[in-house]
Amino acid sequence: MNKALAELIRISNETGGDPTLVQGGGGNTSVKTADGKYMYIKASGTALKDMNQKQGWRRIRLEPVLAILKDKSLPKLDASTREPKVVNMLLDACDDNVKTIARPSVEAHLHACLNTCVIHLHPSAAGAYVNAKNGKAKLARLFKDETLPPLWVPYTDPGFLLAKKIARLVNSYQGKFGKKPSILFLEKHGLFITSKTASGALRLVRSVMKRCNSKLKQPRDGSVKAVQQEKISDLKLCIERACFQAARKRTTIWYYYNDAIADFLNQKDAKKMLFGSLTPDELVYANGPAMWIEMPKSKKSFSKAALQNKSKSIAGRLKQQKQKGKKPYVAFLVKDIGLFVSGTEKITPTVRDIVLYSIFIRTNAYRMGGILTLNKRQEDFINNWESEAFRKKLASGSK
Ligand SMILES: [Zn+2]
């Protein structure tokens, strides 16, 4: 295996297995070849941890990719025309023996303008800042002793416009500091780490995470209390029924519970924190935040009649979401009981990891002074984004 590809697999596998760094098929990585002609980059729809020397990546020519960013006609196009066009241009720039339909990451053009090794992650520890109202100022204080400070990237719709903005910001950063930035915090999105070597990039990921975490509240160990199996089964059925009533479609309900979930459920303001979508990924994979559900303390709340009423009220809330033009909840946080997720066996672990990521961010951003979420226009853009739909289709296993 050549050196650049070996490094790509190394940085992908070492970061991709940690759900606090990246969830499901999110995040992406790339390594440029020593001759400066090519870049190996993660393929869209692949999880970082699943990449190996045979699959999960594409080799792309750098010159046409950088030309996309300089193209004068693209910014004038409507997003619905432009984004599929850019995806095809990226596909045309591929130069390898890959025979599958795997497309290069939709962020390939963005990677092209950064250093040799690029690791893009959605870490919960970075999210606590990029999704906090005063996160930018907090980060500036946290990294104030760095001679090369992190670059802050204000929220921009993903795809071509984000790549353009980053190219511009990197350029002016280079003008000011004489070097490209090695740490980029993307508002309401995530983190980019870029370095000359794979080891350097991995080291930087670890040190940035350590520094971010140093000021954050971590879930308390031993928060989990025993929950009666019967209550779990009752609630699974109750939520399953509600989903059916709302959508006339059968779905399976899965149950998860651990210290992080229990710690969140115990917080006084937990319910208040569950609003809006934090990032494009939370919106795409989990349809936004989890629904908050409380069961009255009395024994009667688990009677047959009470559970049927609960189903009806949950179904009502699901229908309301639909009427508002929003995608219905797929995650349900039930006070004192745990997390329930509706969906296929393949997609639900990703939803669970996104909920864990989300409650960590919400807890910390809330403590920091307020949670920052995508606004309506930003959400609409994501919902209409063709390539996100493609990514989700691949992740859910459909052809
Ligand atoms: Zn991302």
Image: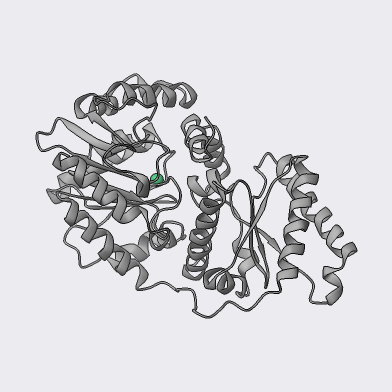
- Residue 134 can be seen, yes or no: no
Locate residue 367, reporting x and y percent: 50, 71
Quadrant of the image for the N terminus? top left
Q: Is residue 63 left or right of residue 210?
A: left
The residue most toward the top is 73
Q: Is residue 172 left or right of residue 87?
A: left
Nearer-the-camera pick, 12 or 332: 12
Q: Is residue 43 left or right of residue 265?
A: left
Q: Residue at x 34, y 38 (%)?
A: 56
Nearer-the-camera pick, 145 or 115: 115
The image quarter in which residue 61 lies: top left
Position above or below: 123 against 58: below
Locate residue 33, reporting x and y percent: 15, 37
Position above or below: 30 against 67: below
- Residue 352 can be seen, yes or no: yes
Coloring basis for residues? one colour
Locate residue 354, reporting x and y percent: 51, 55
Locate residue 148, reporting x and y percent: 18, 57
Q: Is residue 355 left or right of residue 226?
A: left
Position above or below: 235 against 224: above
User: Which quadrant of the frame does ligand 1 lie within?
Assistant: top left
The residue most toward the left is 35
The total number of labels drawn is 0
The residue most toward the right is 305
Q: Residue at x 55, y 70 (%)?
A: 258
